[in-house]
Amino acid sequence: MKKLYLVGLAAALAFSVDSPARADGDQFIPILSYRTGPYAPNGIPYANGFVDYLELVNRRDGGVNGIKLAFEECETGYATDRGVECYERLKGKGPTGASFFNPLSTGITFALTEKAPADKIPLITFGYGRSESRDGSVFRWSFPLLGTYWTAADVIVQYIASQVGGVEALRGKKIVHLYLDSPYGKEPLPVLEAKAAKYGFSLTPMPVTAPGLEQKSQWLQIRQSKPDFVILWGYGVMDPTAMQEAAAVNFPRDRIIGNWWAGAEPDVAPAGEQGIGYKAVMLQHGAGRGKVHADVEKYVVTAGVSRSKPEEIGQVLYNRGLLNAMLGVEAIRTAQAKFGKRPLTGEEVRWGIENLKLDESRIAALGIEGMIRPFQISCADHQGAGLSRVQQWDGKTWKVVSDWIQADESLLAPMVKAAAQKYGADKSIPAFDCTKAQ
């Protein structure tokens, strides 16, 4: 596991990524990345997928309706204070300032949630961040597109229920929530606790100190308590370490289910055979290549401007970075239809995100069929979708092992509304009337 630190550091020091904005009219997109530290093996392919897509739009399409995309990376190391420093340094760059920010960390997201409204810069938190921020009437500048941690937690419990004979059979079962002791790891707890109270299973939260290399005591507790399932909310080196420790105490890997940030190749490959059988929910997409990847090969890789390893293109985190960039670009395109084909302000891009809609024909045109489902964002719903599936690692690839599972809105919607209203009251933020959104 410790070798992963050195791999990430060497990769990060090998190059820097930026395409400076021209004063005469580029759209500037800042990139908060982490190519160093314990989470570098996860951060590097994500950042590479994000940058490759921006390069693709510039080289294949000449930008968005003729407006080139400028970008610059800032290394956060996944640290909140460094993320805030990067935000402050990049937010005013380009002719109109930053288009949007992807904090790429729950801790950084929490910090920027209070800064973004004042600066009028939207936050795209694709599958992470504050779960209640899907309520756009309070969180006008935050967009947890296509999934929150509350969504993931609900889907995981639903999947566990399907494996034991239905929700009625959950009563009396024992589930451990093994999580990175951070805002990220704690975020799903309210939903897991609510599900436990509703269906009668016992929930044991079990924190792991970052970065997660020391888990022996937790797995000894798991061996003694003999839970039916372990929900893994880890990241980076914590996840393959969990596979190894589970093997050491003979806990079945197919009864460990992670969230979508614990469901990529770096989470299992370093564990070798000890990771076989492990499962994780998907942020809709998984691994695999499509038309968009062929275009990346043709226009970006062949041109020698991709930093990606050949085997990395099409892996889970590469695809997630690519899709995140695509969502931002499509939001810019949507906003251009209203405000004109020119560099847009963050405030104008915010409108584009809130009115973002991808139907089947647009998904096909983008070359991402099979990676996401059609969705639509609105003022009231900044998430846009609550669907997920479960995948399983067979030692070489991820295999989808479930049908689509829809999160239980009868449970989640009231929780989101209550949490958003409390946040608004605590921060003196009056709720916006979404019926007046234009």
Image (cartoon, grey):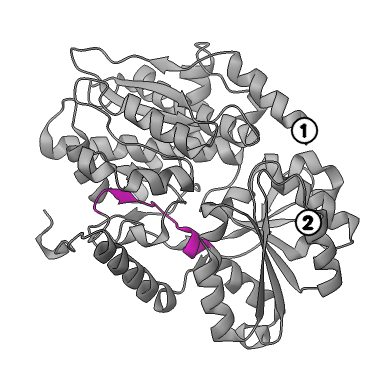
Q: Residue at x 46, y 51 (%)?
A: 127
Q: Residue at x 28, y 63 (%)?
A: 426
Residue type, numbered disc 2: Gly
Where, by quadrant of the figure, is residue 1 drawn?
top right
Image x and y of residue 290, in percent:
53, 37
Q: Is residue 358 visible?
A: no
The answer to which of 333 and 197 lies nearer the viewer is 197
The answer to which of 352 and 134 lies nearer the viewer is 134
Q: Earlier in the sequence, mark 1 or mark 2?
A: 1
The stretch in magenta equals 140-152
Q: Is residue 305 visible?
A: yes
Would you name the residue on which mark 2 appears?
277
Determine whether 92 is above or below 153 in the image. above
Image x and y of residue 35, in percent:
57, 27
State if disc 2 and disc 1 touch (CB < 8 Å): no
Determine whether 241 is above or below 250 in the image. above
Q: Is residue 433 left or right of residue 269?
A: left
The answer to which of 113 and 29 lies nearer the viewer is 113
Q: Is residue 317 left or right of residue 328?
A: right
Magenta run includes residue 416: no
Where, by quadrant of the figure, is residue 61 drawn?
top left
Residue type, numbered disc 1: Lys
Q: Is residue 247 left or right of residue 317?
A: right
- The image's mark for residue 2 is 1
Give the spatial CA distance, label 1 vs label 2: 24 Å
Q: Residue at x 77, y 62 (%)?
A: 254
Q: Is residue 109 left or right of residue 45?
A: left
Q: Nearer the viewer, mark 1 or mark 2?
A: 1
Determine whether 190 is above or below 97 in the image. below
Dot 2 alpha-carbon crowd within 10 angstroms: few under 14, some 14 to 19, many 20 or more: many
SS state under label 2: loop
